[in-house]
Image: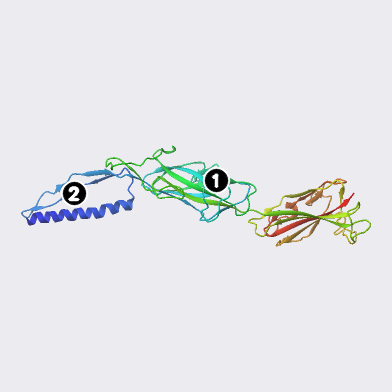
Amino acid sequence: MKTLQKLLMMCTLFVGMMVMIMPQAALAAGTASDTDITNQATVSFDVGGSAQTPILSNTTTFKVDNKIDLIVAEVSSGYTDVNPNTTNQVLTFTVKNDGNTTQDFALSAAAGVDPFGGTDNFDASNVRVFVESGANAGYLAGEDTATYIDELAADGVATAYVLADIPIGRSSDDIAAYTLTATALAGGSAGVEGAALTQTVGADTPGAVDIVFADGTGDTDGDRDASYSDTDAYRVLSAQLTITKASTVIRDPFNLDTNPKHIPGAYIQYVVTISNAVGAGASATLTTITDTLDNNTAIDPDLIVAATGNPESAPGSGFKVGVGGSSTRAGFPKYFTTTSSVDGVDHDGSATGGTVTATMATVMSVEAGYTAGELKPGESVTLIFNVIIQ
């Protein structure tokens, strides 16, 4: 009787140790699917104080099933700032295979809800998804061309990019949100996008690899559906330009500068002002200012002063450019000739009418803190010239 009790206690202890050890080791290793797990118990015992040949149990075997799990996460943790009328703007995501099997992953992007508390108010165009090749970090056209994740190992992480074009005319703080959804597919064939997966229903099949969906709920997908989604958003940073043109009669042949009138021979001063609002989200790079004059006027080549009738700067310097607001550009106001085609401001030479053209990269050239033609938020620039009524 004592021998039987001892035998039972030993068996109980042995089985208990196996229960404690085996599951912990499996969890720590993240055992791959299709792995055979085998187990056999051994009983050692004595009879009449003499050790006997141990008895072996039958061997049990089962296969580890395929746990489908994944996580999609946007990388920036905030808005991706973009400018209007730009192409191939990038939102970056990671896709992690949290399952225990190498899988392919299909990728798709769709307009979503701003995850950072703002309001989505426009759609980008030409929306596409590409996968990082691993050759060089960051999206590179011609290098990152795959449209699905191929053979991502368990615990592996891939980078995916949502690309889109931002329409012209969008204003600062406009927002376009996009959700990236990854869906697990069958793996096993490199270079071939795998088939859709179906979760195993009914009882476990010990000798086969069953499929279990273990993923959580993302931004737009459901629980345990082999998909996961997360959302990022573009935020537009744009200049907020306004342009105004003022017209003032400053001198006529009879009244001079005292209450002058709009009569033939009178001088009209035009002031063209371009301003970038204080609250603008970005600088503007001015390219050209053009002004087509009425054929009943002629350009004043000297920019005369109303009170004296003399040139403000020098004969032939008929254009004046100034900066205002918070601008720290040096050397303004500057004067430009009406005849030179290289100093930045020009009249086409017509006897009457004609076109005034200011090339702003030349007028507002590169200097400390400024790129060519740059007009920062809160700054303004003025173009001043006179015409004479014919």
Seen in the picture, residue 147 relative to 238 is either above or below; the reply is above
Estimate the x, y position of residue 286 in percent, counting from the top left. 71, 52
In primary-sequence order, the first of circles 2 and 1 is 2
Q: Name the spot of residue 38 as percent of width and height, x first.
A: 24, 45
| Amino acid residing under circle 2 | Ala
Left or right of 168, for residue 179: left
Q: Is residue 11 left or right of residue 388?
A: left
**Residue 246 higher or lower than 161, as above or below:** below
Instruction: Tell me, yes or no, if residue 6 can be seen here.
Output: yes
Give coordinates of residue 323: x percent, y percent.
75, 59
Q: Amino acid at mark 1?
A: Leu
Residue at 72 percent across and 61 percent down: it is 325
Residue 293: where, in percent of width, then height? Answer: 82, 48
**Residue occupied by mark 2:** 41
**Residue 87 visible in image:** no
> Which residue is pictured at 32% across the width and 53% down the height?
28
To which quarter of the image does residue 20 belong? bottom left
Q: Which residue is mark 1?
A: 163
Residue that protrudes farthest toward the right in the picture: 254
